[in-house]
Structure formats: C-alpha cells, structure tokens
Amino acid sequence: MAIKQLSETLINQIAAGEVIERPASAAKELIENALDAGATRIEIATAGGGKTLLRVTDNGSGMSPADLELAIRRHCTSKISDSLIDIRTLGFRGEALPSIGSVARLSITTRTAEAREGAAITVTGGRSEPVRPSAANVGTVVEVRDLFFATPARLKFMKSEKAEAAAISEVVRRMAVAFPKVRFVLSGSDRSTLEFPATGDDRLARMAQVLGKDFRDNAIEIDAERQGARLTGFAGVPTFNRGNSLQQYAFVNGRPVQDKLILSAIRAAYAETIPQGRYAVAVLSITLDPALVDVNVHPAKSDVRFRDPGLIRGLIIGAIREALARGGDRAATTGASAMMRAFRPEAYRPEHQGPRELWTAAASPYRPMRFDEAASGFAEAPQARFTEFAQPSARAAAQLAELRRAEGPAPSFPLGAARAQLHENYIVAQTDDGLVIVDQHAAHERLVFETMRAALHSRPVPAQALLIPEIVDLPEDDCDRLVAHAEEFMRLGLAIERFGPGAVAVRETPAMLGEVDAAGLVRQLADELAEWDTANGLRGRLEYLAATMACHGSVRSGRRLRTEEMNALLRQMEATPGSGQCNHGRPTYIELKLADIERLFGRS
C-alpha cells in the first residue's frame, strides 16, 4: 500500500483526539490562552455540558487580524521560539484552536487596545473563512458550538451533560486556585452561576472560595525550599480529610497538574495519620527553573517530568510533615460543627424533613419529671451513678493554676484540665476558652503507637535468619532496583542479596512479622519500587503491626480513670506529635469553643 500525505483537516482531527478529549479539555485550553493573554476577568458559558456551547470571554490583550489568521493554523504560537527548555506560559504547542476548529464550529472575535475595530474568524469542521471586521471589546471571545459534530463517533464516548458540566467546573476551580488575581465566572444552561471574585495576593482567600471556608480554619501554611526548588501552599490537618482526592491541588510553575509523583508524595506525607480510603486536602505550588521540569510529556499537559524526582518528592514529604508537626495536632473545626448539630433539638434543625408527631403531654421534653424517673439517673440504664463520686466544681481555674505551678513558669495546656469521665470512655476537659472531649482509648492507642514507632526507627529491626535462604526469581530490572535498596532493607530486618542475573536470595526477615511469605514480600517491594521509586511497603507493614499491638495494649474503653490519670493522658497528648488522631486516622478529641457553646444557648 502506497504512503500518502494526509490532509490538513484529517491531521487536525487526529491531533484533536489527543488534545481535546472532552468539553472540559477544550475549556482548559481556552482558559489557558486567556490567562497567557494577561486576562484579569474570564467568563465561561456552557450549554449541554459544553457539547452544545462553550464560550470563553476574556479581557486580555487580544489579537490583530494577522495574528488571528495564524492562530487557527497548526503549530502557530507566540509563546515559544526555538526551544522547549524555557517554557513560562501555560500553552506553547499551537494545537488547541486548530484542533477544536477541526471537530466543531469555532468562531473567534478579538480586538487589541490599539485597534479601532475588532476582527472575527469562523472555522467549521476544519474549513476556515477569511478574517472579517467585527465590533468587539478589548480582549477575545472564543465560541465553540456542536463539539465533535465532525467526528460523530467521539460523541458516543461522552458522558452525561451533568458529568461533562461537572468536569468543566473542576477545570475552572483548579484554574481559580492557581490564579487568585483573576476573576472567574462560570454559567451553565441551568442558569446556575459559579463565581470566584479576584482576591489579589491573598491566596488563602481564593482557596477558601474554592475548597470551602472550613479549609481556612483547618489549613497549615507551607513554605520550604531545597536546592533551588520552592514549595508553597497549605496542607489540611489530618482530621480534615475527604473521601476522594479531588481536593488535592498541585501546581508547577503556575501550571495545574495531576502528577502521579506529587500525589504519591502527599499520600506518603500523611501516612499513618489518615484512615484507609480517606484523602488529605492540600494545595501545593512548586516553583523551580523551567529547565528542570519537562511539561511536554502529555498532550493535555497534565503530567510533568522532573529532572530530579527524588528532590521534589523529598521536598513535599518533608515540608508537609514539618507543617503537621508544627500545627497538625488539633481536631478539625468540622468536628465542633457536627457536635453543635448533634446538640441542637431535632425540631429546630433546618434539614429536618421527617413527619411531625402530634404534641402530647407525655411526649413533651419539658414535662415535670416524676420522682421515680429522677431517682433512676436520668432514666437511662447505662448511666453511671454519680452518687459514688464527689461532685467537682464547674470551674477548673483552680485546677489549671495548680497544674501550671507544678509544670513550670509559663506552661501551655491546649487540652485543659480533666473535669469528668463519661461512660468510662470519654474524658471531658475544660480549657481556657472552651471544652474538649477525648476518646481515652483512641488517644492512648496513639501514644503507645508513637512510642513503639520511635523505638522501631531508632535502631535496626531485629531479624530472624532463614534456615534455608529463599530464592526469588524476578526480572533483571527488578533485581537491580531491589539490590540498590538492600542497605535500607537491612535496617528493617530484611537481608537480600543478588543470586544470579534474574534472582535474589532472601536470608533474613523481620522478626516482628513472624512467619512471612518472603517471596510475596519481595515481589511486592519490587512492584512498589518500579511504580513509585520508593520502598515503604516493608516499613508500612512493620508500622501496621506496631499499630495493632498498640491497639490491644492501650487503655480500654470502659476503664474508670482517676483525675490524675486523665490529666496525665492529656499532658502526654500535648507532648506527642500526631496525637490528634488515632492509628486508624480517626480524631482522638473534639474541641468546642465557649463561643460555640454560647451560640447553642442563643447567647450570641
């Protein structure tokens, strides 16, 4: 079969299959063009989930008629010259507009500040019309109608209008976080409007717009630098987590990316602090020399490749862990909000939609209490008898003062002084500005685990020698990676050595693991090294075992504690990193401020 040159339209349609996967991809490319043009206001209008209509209006620099004619041609761009080493703009390939025009009905109207009139051009299924004069404001309006009408097969792979509209919303959110000085407005066919006013240099205010106001109260600032790479942003406290990773935002030199290396580093930084299946909330921005990162590795530019991935991974993990050690040992404010909702009577909850029961004297919560009910301890069988204990004062000022005198000149007690123990499991402590409820089992479990983990990391893990070394056959590349980390494995109690070109010999395994499938363990580590270039699986298994042992060796629920024991537990929690959540990632305490309590009683 003879080789022939493809037509320009077919070439553009092939490129569109890579660059424009769905309406959200087209929206991303058009918003990037607007940002590169210096826009401070970008409006996006959609209909049919972006398949029927996608219009992006900006107040950027605009284009001259000559530039507009070139803009719809492949590989015509003003953003790079002869090198891909120093890319400082979001777009650079010159493929977006011709790709969109080859599969949709594209019209562009633009005007520069110096021009007295604007210019417009139309491209339909790859066929363009001449540039014509047009009335226009300064900036550019790009309108895309009937996306993929020229390639009907692609329409069969589109999701529902609601799903496509949600994908466009996610693109706008990520762009809004990356560019807080730009005002974004997204409107849909259902007349809903998503608006993010510009916040200038206040990046946290923009993050609060996108991620919710709770993020502002539960975020820790990050600012770290290593070997020319700088990491800034905010990381949520471990107890402020989500069921998916959609609220993990990463930017490289201002470019929103969804890079596997960055996401894995975030996961590793929050290891042992967030429960399985939950994800941290974080916004990270990496700034480095453009020559040290390759952004030309994915058609949609969502992935990047770092020249030194180990440097970037170490920077992210170290910075997040330092931030968590500095301010992450606290309960999320969302716990207090849920607590307040639980305290409110059901009848006063706005969300209560259940059927209303008729009022009766017997069912009224304000009826006079009978003597037999009062004598039974609030008529609850599990309620502990209070007559066995001396009733404490409602004020803890004297106890706090006594603790401060005992601890030193100016100690701080964020968890306050123990006032009571409820149901032999929950410690109620009074702080300077509120109260704290502590789960004694979860808290002590974390304290025991941190002690065991410190011992685990401070000295080599005891190993048990195998009577007969186990030979594990592996591809030669996996063997090379395992042997390169042999010294690290040795410190964790796993002794391996090369056994020919395609095998390794396992001579010792960690004693903590008991009988272990050595071959399965080594293969798992080899897969992890190939995927993430790290070997944390063995350490994770050892720490998981330590967490299990801590769970069984900690103070059990149902054990009655003396006041001295409760206060000792609170002081240990204050001195232990990571004590805000248990080994499974659940919060160990919930804090309620005095202002919240007064709001419950309508006093503020």
Image (cartoon, rainbow, N blue to C red):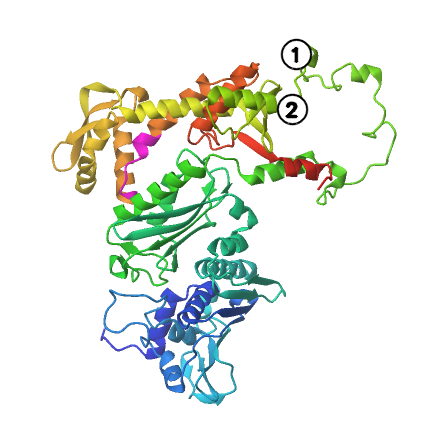
Residue 426 visible here: no
Other-residue count near label 1 (Cα within 10 Å), few / some / many at <14 / 14–19 / ≥20: few
Where is residue 486? Give x, y as percent.
19, 32
Residue 263 lies in the magenta-colored region: no
Residue at the location (56% across, 49% down)?
213
Q: Which stretch is magenta? A: 532-540
Check disc 1 and report its element: helix, strand or loop. loop
Quadrant of residue 335 in the image? top right
Q: Residue 294's spot in the image, x, y percent?
A: 27, 59
Q: Which mark is residue 395?
A: 2
Q: Is residue 35 above or below residue 424?
A: below
Does residue 275 appear left or right of residue 593 in this picture?
left
Q: Residues within 10 Å of mark 2 (few under 14, many from 20)?
A: few
Give the percent coordinates (x, y) of residue 387.
70, 11
Q: Indicate the amino acid at tag 1.
A: Phe
What percent of the width, then of the height, locates residue 123? 44, 81
Q: In front: 155, or 552?
A: 552
Q: Residue furthest right?
A: 361
Disc 2 is placed on an element classified as: loop
